[in-house]
Image: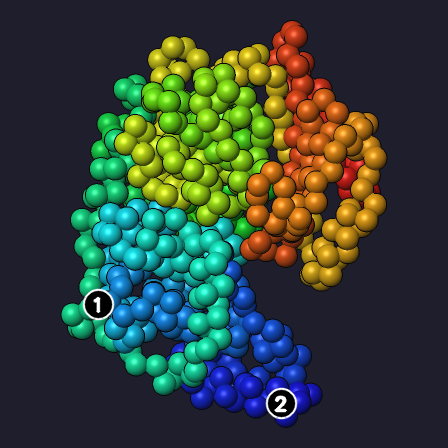
Amino acid sequence: MMSSDLAGLARSWLAQDPDPDTRAELEKLLESDDGDALRERFGSRLEFGTAGLRGELGAGPNRMNRVTVMRAAAGLARVLGPGKHVVIGYDARHKSDTFAHDTAAVLTGAGLRASVLPRPLPTPVLAFAVRHLGADAGVTVTASHNPPRDNGYKVYWGDGSQIVPPVDAEISAAIDATGPVSELPLGSPGDPAWSELDDGIVAAYLEAVVALPIGDARELRVAYTPLHGVGGDTLARAFVTAGFDAPATVEAQAEPDPDFPTVAFPNPEEPGAMDLALELAERVGADLVLANDPDADRCAVGVPLPGGGYRMLTGDEVGALLGEHVIRQTSGDGRLVATTIVSSSLLGKIAAGYGVRYAETLTGFKWIMKAGAGLLFGYEEALGYSVGSGLGLPVHDKDGIGAALTVAGIAARAKLEGRGLLDLLDDLARRHGLHATSQLSFRVADLSLITGAMARLRSAPPARLGGREVEAADDLSLGTGGLPPTDGVRYHLAGGARVVVRPSGTEPKLKCYLEVVVPVTGEVSAARARAVRDLDALKTDLTEALGL
């Protein structure tokens, strides 16, 4: 049974809700007196932060819906002010197009200019468009690789990168000051301030991407999947424009589908998500397997094994290959490469070997893009990469299309020399030691479990993990190494190993990032086998320490 206060909140929401779907949902819950379901929707709210908004579709402030989106747009409009220009993009998830056009209506009604991308397109096209059009901000409606029931709202600033503090707090405060959305003045598609962009913005993005330093080798057979997302057409155009053959694409996953019917989670890192792509690779004898997540800002890479079959590379392995490639393809004293504190330490050693500057940032591309002047490459272990050239970064965010194209260029050059990406990784291991990384993730229904685990790690840090002494422990919430505070702990272990534990910023997960460094004195395969054993030992001890 619901309280009168809860029923009042629901009826107030109902009075301003322009969406017949969520209105029907609320009316049914009120009629059935379902207090638990209403408390779930009205007992808390989605918080606007540096990742914008992301959550389950449905009615109420704790769901993604038209009211939530219009309030976010009104907050953004208040912070920017009249006359400013905002570019709006969207993916193919449920309600994404509606949320994008609601955003344009609110912004133009508040006296701003809005330019809407012509159709569902990759997030990197939106990030590129902000700078290309000289806009003051950008919005993309996407939940990236989240489950089908979710959607989200991500804000970019005029530099084409995601917002960071204090802008997020300013927008959040402006959202709080927004009244009922039914009272907001709204523009319409016919208004002079509201424009619909055409395919010219995609052509401009493709021109910038094919100018990346991808080498001149083009003989390569690629198997690809967009995982029911929006990357397929843009990636195929990028490959053909650059002179490659169009990839063989997984037919069942080629077209955008907001229900993602062939995968449990539309995330190339999740078990089973790459099965169809790997089957296609076997059928066509692919030299390379590529995948984008549903909004195509991330890129997964698979390679053939010497004895048959394929394996997916980790984000750190791809980051190392891309980082060295960009460094070798560019020149100049001011070059900078960057990654995050949870990614492998190998990029720093590669950079030092070439005399190139290196920076570590907090997790997330919003921080990588703030690493400093001269940034030509940045990556995060979660399959996100921004690849640049002597002209700088065409996209100030992770770009799954540009990364895929660059990986293809590296693989094509290696094939021309009778080698593969695994051979290039072995080269790096011989020079710098084998850097092996892995993850532990704990998904919870009760967020207090994560809070408790973090408290235990801070109050009683382990003395040993995986048979290695914990030589130093950093509480990242206090700020360390000049980085802003963030919720996490980091352990430095004997032999160059490292463990970082942090709550996810977008999902109810506790994430643990593990790295071991194994010297290569003989065959690289022996070092890899030892690394697997060392990582397994770390996982066992860390699981026990977390108590989850």
The N terminus - image quarter: bottom right
The residue positioned farthest toward the top in the image shown? 522
Circle 2 residue: 5
What residue sits 30% from the left and 28% below the top?
390
Q: Position of residue 445 (x, y in %)?
A: 69, 61
Circle 1 residue: 194
Whichever of labels 1 and 2 marks the residue nearer the N terminus, that label is 2
What residue sits 32% from the left and 25% below the top?
214
Quadrant of the rendered structure where residue 525 is? top right
* Residue 128 in view (yes/no): yes
Q: Amino acid at mark 1?
A: Trp
What residue sits 61% from the left and 49% below the top?
485
- Residue 179 disc label: none
How far is disc 1 from disc 2 in space, using C-alphas?
A: 40 Å
Q: How is the image coloured?
A: rainbow
- Of residues 60 and 263, the one drawn nearer to the viewer in this rendering: 60
Q: Position of residue 152 (x, y in %)?
A: 46, 61
Please, is residue 51 above or below residue 252 in the view? below
Q: Secondary structure at mark 1?
A: strand
Q: Secondary structure at mark 2?
A: helix
* Residue 260 in view (yes/no): no
